[in-house]
Amino acid sequence: MKKYSYLILFLLVSNFVFAQEVVNNDPMLVSTKKKNTESLDYEKIKGTPYLYSDFKSGFVYIKDKAPTKILVKYDLYMKEMVIIANEVIYSFRKEMPFDSICIENQTFVYNSNWGNNAYFELLAKGSLSLLKDYKVEIFQPVSKNSYSYNVEPAFTKPVEVYYLLKNDKLTKIKLSKSDILSAMDDKKDLVEQYVSKNKLSLKKEDDAVKVINYYNNL
């Protein structure tokens, strides 16, 4: 059964270090047992709750501090960044102030004021930002009768949900021309010309990112 602990990252951390080195040698990092959270035995649930199966090299960025190197993967069901150190699994504590967590070519941000407990992937950043959330649930099969075969619970496949962030307001959207352009009324004509000229489809994530970056640079 998987057990989680809190990994408390203090603002004074200023060197590139692996999480395992920090936990062992840096008194500013403390691990404590996670409380008031139900433990799940992931081995009894089919599929995976993780965005990627293996731990990956990543960095925690804190304003005015050098980034801290970690080994991490994202638990989409629990909405937790899971860090490994000395074969012990920790959960990054969201209460700690940080700017972002970068894992390879993906950047994740968190803000408790957005009313969502998730880490959002930051796809485009500016006066208008595009964010992506990944939702995973546990499918609990229901037997229709006593003769039904027992079916194990399973994690659902990740569902991607998109948001626009403007003036500190988070709005859930679909990747569509109407939803995205509705946030660009002040420069809508220029953006529409850009979309048409470059034959972009706002139903595609990569094209939506291009359009929002263009808008932010106008």
Image: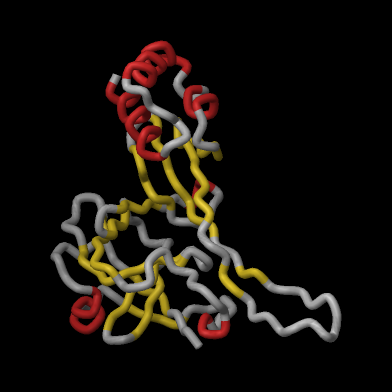
Q: Tell me if residue 198 comes above or below residue 169 in the rendering.
A: above
Q: Nearer the viewer, residue 116 or 40?
A: 40
Q: Quadrant of residue 198?
A: top left
Q: Residue 216, percent across and down? A: 32, 26
- In the image, 51: left or right of 138? left
Quadrant location of the C terminus in the rendered image: top left
Q: Quadrant of residue 50?
A: bottom left
Q: Quadrant of residue 15?
A: bottom left
Q: Nearer the viewer, residue 37 or 154?
A: 154
In the rendered view, how is the structure colored? secondary structure
The residue positioned farthest toward the top in the image shown: 189
Q: Residue at x 77, y 74 (%)?
A: 142
Q: Residue 22, percent across and down? A: 21, 76
Q: Residue at x 18, y 82 (%)?
A: 25
Q: Residue at x 44, y 30 (%)?
A: 202
Q: Residue 169, percent across and down? A: 50, 36
Q: Residue at x 48, y 64 (%)?
A: 76
The residue positioned farthest toward the right in the image shown: 145
- In the image, 47: left or right of 98? right
Q: Tell me if residue 105 comes above or below residue 2 in the rendering.
A: above
